[in-house]
Amino acid sequence: MPTLWNKGTAATTLVEDFTVSSDRVLDLRLAKYDVLGSKAHIKMLESIGLLEESELEVLEKALDEILEEISSGVFTLEDDVEDIHSQIEILLTRRLGEVGKKIHSGRSRNDQVLVDVKLFLRDELLAVRKEVLELFEQLQALSEKYKDILIPGYTHGQLAMPSSFGLWFGAIAESLADDMFLLQGAYHLVNQNPLGSAAGYGNSFPLNRQMTTDLLGFESMDYNSIAAQLSRGKAEKAVASAIGGVALTLNRFAADCCLYMCPNFGFISFPAELTTGSSIMPHKKNPDVWEVIRGHCNSVLAAETEISLLCSNLQHGYHRDFQLLKDILFPKLELIHDCLKMALYMIAQVKVNENILSSDLYDNIFTVEEVNRRVLAGVPFRDAYKGVGIEVNEGRFKALKSVHHTHEGSIGNLCNDRIKVKMEIAADF
């Protein structure tokens, strides 16, 4: 396999296959960003006299043509080309001759990969933000729609106190708002320009790094050239942590949905076409979608640990280990997109059981309400608690199935408007 960095000694096919692995496939996702980074880089090179204006023009035209090929889906990575960066430079040289060879002046594949990955992750985080916001809005709408429909709340998996569909849906919505702060933090970490750090020690050319920072829309740059290289792995870890937060929220919600769909609970249901059946049990309506979401989210949660272990115990500077970051993170990004889209599709069609508490099975969740009523009537708390406990044990407790909660965040005061403001602040990136 020819490489742009080859100095005359050929690696064996076995070594090439092992070190390149799936990188060529994953690199196709970076093709667009490699072109965008190159376009900014050559404008900067022209501004400092390393390219003629006429050379810039032909390079820009050729890069735009490659970008169009990428957008239209006809761009490919040739079998004997190592990576996307090599492919684009080879195409430029093939089409333009000597001027195509000038594009790499003032940069290394290290900072070239870094800028590609950061541009890619920046767009991925924006896409996740959009999907989270759509799910958040649907959950808030359901919270408001069913705010007066009571359901049992559980602690330790046991019946506890009254809850409501409004409180449950609203809780998942607010959890997503908290997750959005993680996405925001990851975005700011990613949105720094490493271009110009070269292999990690800068460059003797008088590069204008602020110019490429502005052209690529980064809010800042990784100033110290070594720090830019140290961001390799740290940026991916931050993104993994952020999507892991979303995955944890979806995982718990999916687990709730699986439980609540069970006929023994019967709190919610979905149209038959959104469930699956059994090969031998004709009555089954399995929550396969939620189970798969739950499983995929566990996989997403593992990414941060994998990245942490991969990047540990490495001295500063580039190491080939970093190439494996794409194998870990890129598939997890696909999974979180899929899970968010599927969760939105499912809950848009959820059916709520509005008469759950008509069953005597749930009378005891109102014991706290009764204790509090007696306290408000002047009975000391411990006496009220003991009295209600005796009634429960003797089978004499009669539930008044009503609640009167007024404090912020309770059944009667969901604060969905304030949660919406929280989300707006979190999503402002």
Image (cartoon, helix red, strand yellow):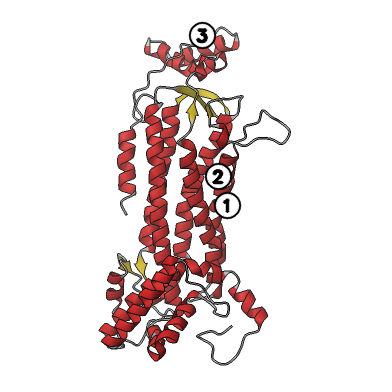
Q: Which residue is mark 2?
A: 293
Farthest residue to the bottom: give it.
Answer: 8
Q: Which residue is mark 3?
A: 398
* Res. 168 in view: yes
Q: Residues within 10 Å of mark 1 (few under 14, many from 20)?
A: some
Q: Which residue is mark 1?
A: 299
| Residue type beneath disc 1 | Ser
In the figure, residue 197 lies in which quadrant? Answer: bottom left
| Residue type beneath disc 2 | Ile
Q: Nearer the viewer, mark 3 or mark 2?
A: 2
The residue shown at (42%, 15%) is 402
Compared with residue 424, is residue 143 higher up or lower down, i.e. above or below?
A: above
Where disc 3 sits, the SS reads loop
In the figure, residue 102 lies in which quadrant? Answer: bottom left
- The location of residue 190, given as percent across then percent down, is 39, 63
Counting residues from the N terminus, which is met first, the one under dot 1 or under dot 3? 1
Counting residues from the N terminus, which is met first, the one under dot 3 or under dot 2? 2
| Residue type beneath disc 3 | Lys
- The location of residue 385, given as percent across then percent down, is 49, 15
The one of 66 and 256 positioned closer to us in this rendering = 66
Q: Nearer the viewer, mark 1 or mark 3?
A: 1
Q: Residues within 10 Å of mark 2 (few under 14, many from 20)?
A: many
